[in-house]
Amino acid sequence: MNDPEEEAEMSAPTTGEQPSEPVGARLQRLRAERGLTQRALAEPGYTAAYVSTLEAGKARASETVLRYFAERLQVGYEELAFGLPAGLRSEIRDGIAEAHQLVEAGDGEAAEERLAALTERAGAFGLVDLVAELRTALGAFLLRRGALAEGREQFEQAEDLLADQPLPARVPAIRGRATAHYLEGDVRYSCYLLESTINELNSGGLPDPVSLMLLYASAIGPYLELGALERATKAAGLALALAPRVEDPVAVAGLHRSVARTHVAHGRFAEAEAALVKAQEVYQQWGIRVELAQCHWMRGYLHAQHGRLAEAESELRTAAAMLRASGAAFYAVQVEVELADVRWRLGHTAEAEELLGRLLEGLGPGRGAVHAAAAHRLLGLIRERADDLEAAERHYRTAVDLQREADVTGDLADTTRLLGDLLDRQGRSREAMAAYREGLIRLARPGTTTLGPAPVPPPIPETVQGRGGA
């Protein structure tokens, strides 16, 4: 028989409302509902006298004690310890799944309302982990429709809630916050967040393979924007090495979609297409429209690189329509910037300019700065081709300002070259040299491709098996 004096502490919920019914009273109520005597409940582990003491509120039970009595009463530990309604966790997780279905159906407003209601319900019972999960899901929904600051705030709150939890528990919120900074245009800080988390996981000696794979995959886009192709390629290789340990097919599909970008950057278009096919098969099977749309987006880019403009236009239009139908309007805008480029190359200049002008109303500093810069750069090319040099210069300089703020080195170097050529064409040699110099200095300066310690292979023994989940 256990010694109750050695098990006299019980942990209460760390946040949310405390249950109004004392634990002892709840123990007595559940026992009476089942027609059990104090002795029948207690034995063989404890005594009837100890149960009487607990029910009278004269002693506090440890988690071990409550788990014992919960099993005897055939209820969940949290129901006995904290008064959680039976099945509450399942109810909330089902609600999260329903919210995702609402988003995929294009009813983002209803999805956000559902998550807000679930967050309030989970918070009332101190379910910190579920509140953090709900806030992370809501943050992702907000990013899709372009509410970047609001989405980032949700991820920050999720991190705060999990501050005392192991790092792998915080990784989804950290990834979300890094993505928000990336979309806002703060690309270098996005890399810093991801790299510092990777380093912290690796320094533990036995890092979580799922978390590491997701972090490496998330870093690929920011690396490429910064012109750090070697770093992006290494991150892709490390993530692929971890993929066999990850049981979540959707998470692995996201990795393949990210890896396709590194293949494109190296000019390996067949490998990029193969990676996209792997990702697309999973998204189609699971009915995940936003990610499937992004596969169409990438395939449209591949066609454009090959000069297959009609096929590129078809894929990009499909991607944009799917994204808008799923409420991911902000992502759709990014696709349509590339669609405008294809339409211009097909000879539809006026249509391309009109589309870009409309898109720029929803883009700018802190809200898709990288794609806003791409739109201005394209408008500069269009105006220069039309011999409207003043307008072309204005668009190039706007693009340079946005790219300088976002610190996207490769794009900045390309735009400063275009600006320098335009200025030189007008005989403004000194200004042209200044433009060229800025691009060269940005490419050569320390930190362009060295963003702190390089990602290293995680020290995971071959015998360690990864757990599932994203």
Image (tube, rainbow, N blue to C red):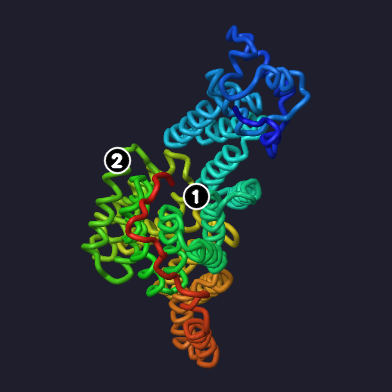
Q: Residue at x 64, y 50 (%)?
A: 164
The answer to whether residue 451 is left or right of residue 253 is right
Q: Nearer the viewer, mark 2 or mark 1?
A: 2
Which quadrant is the N terminus positioned in? top right
Quarter assignment of residue 174: bottom right
The answer to whether residue 227 is left or right of residue 13 is left
User: How far across and how far down the image is residue 269, in percent?
Assistant: 24, 64
Give the alpha-carbon distance from disc 2 to disc 1, as whole Å. Answer: 22 Å
Specify whether residue 354 is in view: no
Q: Is residue 270 above or below residue 447?
A: above
Q: Residue at x 60, y 10 (%)?
A: 36
The circle on residue 397 is none
Question: Looking at numbered disc 1 in the image, what kind of residue is underneath it?
Answer: Phe
Label 2 neighbour load within 10 Å: few <14, some 14-19, many 20+: few
| Closer to us: 6 or 212 | 6
Q: Residue at x 50, y 47 (%)?
A: 144
User: How far across and how far down the image is residue 373, in percent?
Assistant: 50, 66
Quarter assignment of residue 347: bottom left
Q: Is residue 175 above or below residue 432?
A: above
Residue reaching furthest top? Answer: 35
Q: Residue at x 51, y 88 (%)?
A: 437
- Residue to which mark 1 is pinned: 330
Nearest to N terminus: mark 2 or mark 1: 2
The answer to whether residue 342 is left or right of residue 18 is left
The circle on residue 284 is 2
Label 1 neighbour load within 10 Å: few <14, some 14-19, many 20+: many
User: How far across and how far down the image is residue 305, in percent?
Assistant: 28, 65
| Closer to us: 169 or 281 | 169
